[in-house]
Structures are given as C-alpha cells and as structure tokens.
C-alpha cells in the first residue's frame, strides 16, 4: 500500500521531473540548441576568465603601489647609505 506521503515515491517523482526538465533544456545531444548552448557556455567561461585577469591585474597594481615599486620610466633613486663601505 502506497501512502500519499511516501518519501520514496516523492523522491522518484522529483528525480523524474528533474530529468525531463534537463532534457527539455538541453534539447537532446544532437540538436541545434545543444550547439547554441555550447557557444553560450564558451562565452560565459571566456567572460569569467577575462574578469579574473582584470582582477589579478588590478591586485598586482595595488600590491606594487603598496610596496613602493618604481613605475616604469621613473628615474631610479641612487641609494648612498652604504657608499662608504
């Protein structure tokens, strides 16, 4: 006898509906929609990589400024502290 609140049946129905939704979304393996989804995923991944590169470049600039690194083209400071040694 199956009760109206059978957890096993509920879980099986949930998994089945999830699989149906995924098949609708993906449109099958060989459909043109799958190619479009691949292109969209590639664009999203590239955008994420570009954002990461921008972030790391910005952090590198901040670290260089914080550590007092000389900017390119700036004249070098002559350190005379140990000139007598």
Image: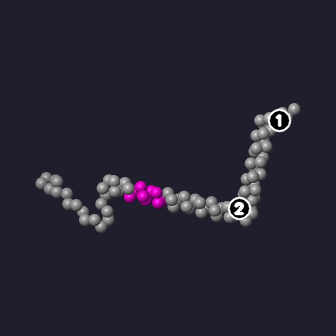
Residue reaching furthest to the bottom: 73
> For the N terminus, which image quadrant?
top right
Which residue is the site of mark 1? 4
Q: Which mark is residue 26?
A: none
Secondary structure type for disc 2: helix
x%, y% of residue 42?
A: 61, 62
Q: Residue at x 64, y 64 (%)?
A: 39
Q: Nearer the viewer, residue 55 or 79?
A: 55
Q: Is residue 59 left or right of residue 3?
A: left
Q: Nearer the viewer, residue 79 or 21?
A: 21
| Circle 1 residues within 10 Å: few <14, some 14–19, many ≥20 | few
Residue reaching furthest to the right: 1
Secondary structure type for disc 1: loop
x%, y% of residue 19?
A: 75, 50
x%, y% of residue 44?
A: 59, 60
Marks 1 and 2: which is nearer the front? 1
Q: Is residue 21 left or right of residue 2?
A: left
x%, y% of residue 83?
A: 14, 56
Which residue is the site of mark 2? 34
Residue reaching furthest to the front: 4
Q: Nearer the viewer, residue 83 or 64?
A: 64
| Circle 2 residues within 10 Å: few <14, some 14–19, many ≥20 | some
Q: Earlier in the sequence, mark 1 or mark 2?
A: 1
Q: Residue at x 32, y 65 (%)?
A: 72
Instruction: Examine the image and state in which quarter residue 9 appears.
Output: top right
Q: Residue at x 55, y 61 (%)?
A: 47
Q: Is residue 84 left or right of residue 3?
A: left
Instruction: Examine the image and state in which quarter residue 48 appears.
Output: bottom right
Q: Is residue 59 magenta?
A: yes
Magenta segment, prevailing SS (helix, strand or loop): helix
Instruction: Examine the image and state in which quarter residue 61 appears.
Output: bottom left
Q: Which residues are magenta?
A: 53-61
């Amino acid at each position: 006898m199956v009760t109206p609140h059978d957890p096993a049946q509920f879980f099986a129905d949930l998994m089945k509906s999830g699989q149906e939704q995924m098949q609708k979304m993906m449109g099958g393996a060989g459909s043109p929609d799958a190619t479009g989804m691949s292109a969209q995923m590639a664009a999203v991944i590239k955008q994420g990589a570009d954002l990461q590169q921008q972030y790391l470049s910005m952090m590198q600039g901040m670290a260089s400024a914080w550590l007092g690194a000389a900017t390119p083209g700036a004249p070098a400071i002559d350190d005379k502290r140990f000139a007598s040694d």
